Image (spheres, helix red, strand yellow):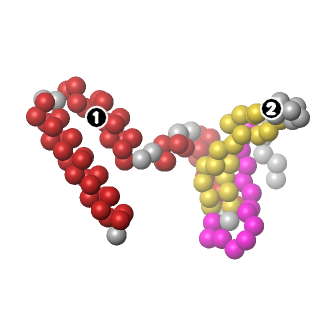
Amino acid sequence: MKMANGVGTVYKLSGNRRNPYIVCKTVGWDIDVKTGKHKQIYVTIGYAPTRAKGLEMLMEYNKNPYDIEASKITFSEVYEKWSAEKFPTISDSNVKVYQASNKRWRLCMIEFLRT
C-alpha cells in the first residue's frame, strides 16, 4: 500500500523478532559530492509487532510530532537543563543540597556499574 509523500513508512525487518516492523520518517536528504547521488536521511520512530500497529504509531506521530532525540537524553543532561532553570530561583543553600545529592547519586551509580 502506497502512502502519501512525507507521511513516512512501515516495513518488515528480516529475522525472528518480537517487533519486526520498523516505523520511519524522512527528515531530509544528503547529496554525495563525489557521485552526485541523493541519500535519504530518516529517523526511526519505533518498532511494532504488526503492520497495523506500526501504521497507527506513524499516524499518531504525524498528528502530534515529538522530539525523538528526547528519549536518548542522559540523566546528566536532564540535571544540567533542570539546574539551569531552577538554580536562579532558589537560595544558595538549596543549590548546595541539590549539587551534593547529584554528586552522591553519581558515585552510587559508578559503584553499581562496577559490580
**Magenta highlight range:** 6-19
Secondary structure of residue under mark 1: helix
Task: Name the residue beneath numbered marker 1.
Answer: 83
- Please identify the residue farthest to the front as the structure is shown: 114
Q: Is residue 112 magenta?
A: no
Within the image, what quadrant is residue 49 found in? Answer: bottom right
Q: Quick one: label 2 or label 1, which is nearer the N terminus?
A: 2
- Residue at image position (19%, 41%) is 98
- Residue at image position (18%, 44%) is 100
What secondary structure is the magenta-colored segment mainly? loop
Amino acid at circle 1 = Ser
- Residue at image position (26%, 58%) is 108
In the image, 66 versus 4, the foreground residue is: 66
Q: Position of residue 63 (x, y in %)?
A: 59, 40
Q: Position of residue 67 (x, y in %)?
A: 53, 39
The local crowd at label 2, few if under 14, some if 14 to 19, many if 20 or more residues have their Cα within 10 Å, is: few
Whether residue 19 is situated above or below residue 86 in the rendered picture: below
User: In the drawing, does residue 95 fall left or right of residue 62?
Assistant: left
Q: Is residue 16 magenta?
A: yes
Secondary structure of residue under mark 2: strand
User: In the drawing, does residue 55 fall left or right of residue 77?
Assistant: right
User: In the drawing, does residue 61 fall left or right of residue 85?
Assistant: right
Amino acid at circle 2 = Ile
Whether residue 38 is situated above or below residue 15 in the rendered picture: above
Determine which of the numbered discs, if any, sits on residue 31 in the image: 2
Q: Position of residue 29 (x, y in %)?
A: 75, 34
The Cα–Cα distance between marks 2 and 1, rounded to whole angstroms, is: 40 Å
- Residue at image position (53%, 42%) is 69
In the image, 62 versus 20, the foreground residue is: 20
Rendered-image quadrant of the C terminus: bottom left
